[in-house]
Image (tube, rainbow, N blue to C red):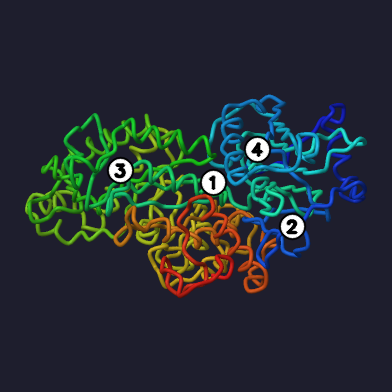
Amino acid sequence: MSTRFPTINPNSPHFFFTVFSICLYLTPIITNSRSIRTITSPSHLSDDSSTTYLWPLPSEFTSGNETLTVNPNLSISGSGNGGNSVIVRDAFARYKSIIFKHVGRSKFSDLDYDVGKVNVIVHSSDEELQLGVDESYTLLIAKSNGLSIIGEVTIEANTVYGALHGLETFSQLCGFDYGTKTVQIYKAPWFIKDKPRFAFRGLLLDTSRHYYPIEIIKQIIESMSYAKLNVLHWHIIDEQSFPLEVPAYPKLWKGAYTKWERYTVEDASEIVNFAKMRGINVMAEIDVPGHAESWGTGYPDLWPSSSCREPLDVSKNFTFEVLSGILQDMRDIFPFELFHLGGDEVNTDCWKYTPHVKQWLQERNMTEKDAYQYFVIKGQEIAISKNWTPVNWEETFNTFAEKLNPKTVVHNWLGPGVCPKAVAQGFKCIYSNQGVWYLDHLDVTWDGFYDAEPLEGITDSTEQKLVIGGEVCMWSETADPSNVQQTIWPRAAAAAERLWTSKEAAPISNTSETALTRLQYFRCLLTRRGVQASPVTNFYARSPPSGPGSCYDQ
C-alpha cells in the first residue's frame, strides 16, 4: 500500500493552516520573543545546536531559531473524523506525563507560555491496524501571537497511527530547562513532513527460551513506540517451552517451564490491545515442524517417538489437527494479517529411523526432504484457510521455493543475498540478516546495525517494493527480564532509523558524523523514560559503562 501524506481540502480551514505554516517558516517570527536563560551542555537539545536531536530522523523538516516555552497545562484539541479517538487522547496523556515529568515551580503564568495547545487533525475514523496502514503525518510548532490563527502545535495525519508518530516527534522536541524549570522547544518554528520508508519495522521477542511477564513485554512495546517500530514478532513457543494457553488443546501448555510461567488467552489479548494503542501490530509465531519438542509434553503422540521428539510427527493426521486447532484459537487473539510458521533448522534424520514414519515415507515414495516440504506446505494451507498470510524462515525458500505458496513472505536470517533472490521470484521478503540485526550477537556494534541496508543488491524498483521491511531479533538463550532491555537498546534504534528514514535523509555515510551524536542523545532519552538502555559505544552490547562520565558521551 502506498503512503500518502495528509491531504487538505482547499476550501477548509486546514488549507490556510498549511499555506500559512510554510510562510511562517520562510519568515520566522522573532520579534517580541521572550529572553530565557538556558543551561546548555554539548549534548543538550539546545537552541544553538546544529544537530537535530530527533530519532528516527524525519523525512523532511525545517526549523528556525526561536526558543518556545510549553505550558504544563498543555491541552489537546481533536478534529477531523478521528481526531477525538481514544487512541489519540490516551497517547496525548502518556506523552504529557513524559514531557512534564520534571516540571517544578515556574515564574510564568498560563498567559506567559508560548505553547498551550496541541491540535490533532485526523482525517480517517478507521482504526484498523494492518500492514501498510498510512503512518504519515505533518507537525507544525510555532509561537502563538496576535497575527497567528494556527494554534501553536498542529499534528495532521490521515490515520490515528500517523498522529501517534507525530506526538512522539513532538515529545522529543520538548526538553526540560533546569534554570527556568520550564519545558522548552528549541529551534522553532518547526515544520515536519514525515512518513516511514518501510511498512514493516519489527522486533522479535523470544518468550520460549526465557519467560517474560506481561508487564515486561508491555515495557518493551512501549519502548518500541519511541523508535517508531511497528511490529512485535512474538516468538511465543519453541522446543524449550510452550507457555501459551490453547483452549482447543488444553494440555499443550504443560510444556511451560512451570505453572507460573504461562500466558492465558486473556494475557495475549491484553498484549495485542496494548500494542495497538501504540500503533504496533503483533505477529505471532509457532515454529514448525522443528523447534517444537515442547508440544509433546502435553500430547506425546505429537512426537515420532520418545527418542525422536522433533520434528513433529509428519505421518499422523493428529499433528495437523493440533496445528489447525492452535491456529484457530490464535486467530481469535491476533488480528494481524501475517502469521509466522517458522520452518527453520529442521533436522529430519530421526524421521527415517522411526519405523512408522519410515514406512509412511516409503508408502508415498517420499524422502525426508519431501516430508519437510509436505509439512511446511500443509501448514501454509491451514494458515491461509484461516485468512492469514504465511511467513516462513528462509530455509523453506532455499530448499523448495517453487513449491511455496505465492503469498509467502520469506524471512531472511542466515546472511545476505536472500531477499534479492526471493523478490526476483516474486516473493515478499523481511530482512533480518543475523550478521547485523541479531541482538543476541553482542559483538555487533551500533554502527553495524545502522549501516545495514535491507535493499542491498536489489536495484529494480518493482522488486524493491517487495521488501516489506525488516526486524531485529531478540533471541533469549542468554537474555531474560533482568537484561533484555539493555540488550535491545540502543542498537535496535539504529535499525529503526534505517527502516523509517529515507536513505536521502539518513545516508550510511553520515554514521560517524551525526548519527552517533543523535543516537547517544536518544539513548539518554530512553533512560530518562525508564528504559534500561546500554551505553552506545561499548564494544560488547549490554555491558556497563567503563567508568564515570556523562550519559551523552557513552
387 lies left or right of 355: right
For mark 3, does the 10 Å Cα neighbourhood hold few (<14), some (14 to 19), or many (20 or more) residues? some
Q: Residue 499: where, in percent of width, then height?
A: 58, 56
Quarter of the N terminus within the rendering: top right
Residue mark closest to the camera, 4 vs 2: 2
Q: Residue at x 35, y 36 (%)?
A: 268
Measured Cα–Cα span from mark 1 to mark 3:
36 Å
Amino acid, disc 2: Thr
Residue mark closest to the camera, 3 vs 4: 4
Measured Cα–Cα span from mark 4 to mark 2:
30 Å
Q: First in sequence: mark 1 or mark 4?
A: 4
Residue mark closest to the camera, 3 vs 2: 2
214 lies left or right of 139: left
Quarter of the C terminus within the rendering: bottom right
Read off the residue under disc 4: 163
Q: Residue 225: where, in percent of width, then height?
A: 54, 46
Q: Secondary structure at mark 4?
A: helix
Q: First in sequence: mark 1 or mark 3?
A: 1
Q: Which mark is residue 38?
A: 2
For mark 2, does the 10 Å Cα neighbourhood hold few (<14), some (14 to 19), or many (20 or more) residues? some
Q: First in sequence: mark 4 or mark 2?
A: 2
For mark 4, does the 10 Å Cα neighbourhood hold few (<14), some (14 to 19), or many (20 or more) residues? many
Measured Cα–Cα span from mark 2 to mark 1:
29 Å
Quadrant of res 381: top left
Q: Which mark is residue 378?
A: 3
Q: First in sequence: mark 3 or mark 4?
A: 4
Amino acid, disc 3: Lys
Q: Residue at x 52, y 46 (%)?
A: 230
User: In the picture shown, does residue 134 fall above or below 209?
Assistant: above
Read off the residue under disc 1: 225
